[in-house]
Structure formats: structure tokens, C-alpha cells
Amino acid sequence: MDIFVKKPVLAIVISLLFVLLGLVSALRLPVVQFPVIESSAIEITTRYTGLAANVVQGFVTEPVERAAMSVPGVDYVDSKTVAGQSTVTAWLKINEDRTAALSELTANLNKIRSDLPADAEEPVISLLRADRPYASFYLDVSSDYWKRFEITDYLTRNVVPVLSSIEGVQRARVEGGREPALRIWVDQVRLAGYNLSSQDLSTLLPQTMLLRRSVMSKAKSSSSTL
């Protein structure tokens, strides 16, 4: 130890050498104690407009749950059913191949499509990152001329599909929107003359509106093509 006291420059050089070796070792050290863990989930949303939650549960949610559970790599499945909509979430095992599971789930849903009600919309599949559920940002949209439901309809039809097609975007949706609504006064006497009840009207009206919207969309696309 006397040599380092008598020759402080040598002590400084050796100390710097140890620091340099430590930095090089830290940069080249393989990070095995922090493995990359990926946790994903697949969400299936199916709309069945005009039906109560228990009806949607029996005719839509349960068949979709069975199709999701049969996908290899699925850890467990949970669901949420409200009036007019079914949401089934299939949680994948850790580091499971999301692409393979998504393809298998799509094939299974195509097999059971004939078992779902004919009036139900096509199931919408979206991929979620369970390990980073809040990796998102918001775009604020406002207008001085359009009403809130008109903005919601435009964003749903034109903007959301474009954002969803961008590479790296998992899901795009409208938050805080307002769907178009109608207030209807029913003449019970005339309705009874057609042998219909209020419940029949509440069931048929949403389906009629969806059909009218589909026809108008096709007509608009045909006119733009011409």
C-alpha cells in the first residue's frame, strides 16, 4: 500500500482503469434478469340492437365465449353484456403468439356465424395490450356547424377506419360521442289496428333504421362511383 501513497498518479490511473472496465462490463452485460414479457387480450364486440341484455347473453355472448375458449393459447375468457351489445374478452397466456391466436379466433367466429341471430351485426375483433392498457392519446374534435350526433356519425364512418388502419394502432374509437336518437309518440289505437304492440315497435324500429342507413350508404357509394 505504501507504493500508492508514494505514487498517487499510479493510484489514480489504476482507479480510472477499474472504472473503465466497469463501464464496459455494464454495457456488454446481457440483461437476463429482465426478460421481455408480452401480455395480450382479444376483444370481440357484437351489436344486437333493440334486444334486452338477457337475450343478447343467450344468443350472442355464450356462443362467442365458446368459440374464444377453443382457441389455443387462451388463458381465460370474461364477458360483459348490456342491452344491444355483447363484449367478450379472451386473455392470452404470457408471450403467446397474438397473430396465430387472432387467426384461429377469426376462423372460429366464421364457423359459428350461422348460429348467431341473423339481425346481429358482424363481430368486431380488436387486439389489446394487457401490459400497456393506457398507451393512448386523444384527438379533440369540435364543430360550429355540426351537432354532436352528426360529428359522432362522421367520425365513426370516416375517421375511425382510417386511424385503425395505421400501423402500430391497436384500436381507435370515439369517446364521449352521442348516437342519433328519436322521440316517438305512438298512437295505440292505430298500432293495435296493425296487430302490433309497443314492444314489437321497439324491436322492429332499430332494425328498420339500420336497414335504411345501409341502403343510403350503398346508394351514396354507387353515386360516387358513377
Image (cartoon, rainbow, N blue to C red):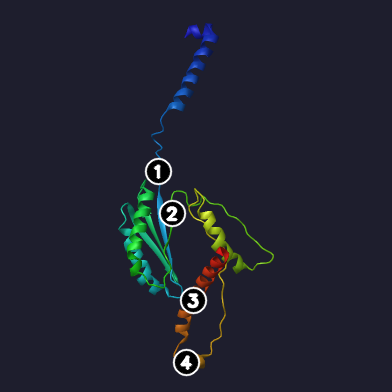
Q: Which of 212 and 184 is in front in this view?
A: 212
Label 4 neighbour load within 10 Å: few <14, some 14-19, many 20+: few
Tag of residue 206 = 3
What residue appears at the point 32 percent right and 59 percent down from the top-left corner? 69
Image coordinates for residue 199, horizontal then vertical, percent? 45, 83
Relative to residue 113, is residue 23 drawn left or right? right
Q: How far apart are marks 1 and 3 (CA)?
A: 44 Å
Label 2 neighbour load within 10 Å: few <14, some 14-19, many 20+: some
Image coordinates for residue 107, horizontal then vertical, percent? 34, 58
Q: Mark 1 points at which residue?
A: 37
Q: What residue type is labelled 3?
A: Pro
Instruction: Determine contact: label 4, label 3, CB under 8 Å.
Output: no
Asked if 135 appears above or below 68 in the picture, the reply is above
What residue appears at the point 49 percent right and 79 percent down from the top-left corner? 205
Q: Name the residue under label 2.
A: 127
- Asked whether the viewer can see residue 92, the reply is no
What residue appears at the point 37 percent right and 69 percent down from the top-left corner? 60
Tag of residue 192 = 4
Asked if 216 appears above or below 13 in the picture, the reply is below
Q: How far apart are marks 2 and 1 (CA)?
A: 17 Å
Mark before the other along the chain sequence, 4 or 3 = 4
Q: How far apart are marks 4 and 3 (CA)?
A: 20 Å
Mark before the other along the chain sequence, 1 or 3 = 1
Determine whether the residue tagged by mark 1 lies in a helix, strand or loop: loop
Mark before the other along the chain sequence, 4 or 2 = 2
Q: What is the residue that sits farthest to the right in this orientation? A: 144
Mark before the other along the chain sequence, 1 or 4 = 1
Q: Nearer the viewer, residue 150 or 66?
A: 150
Q: What residue type is labelled 4?
A: Ala
Q: How far apart are marks 1 and 4 (CA)?
A: 62 Å
For the residues carrying marks 2 and 3, which lies nearer the camera in this image? 3
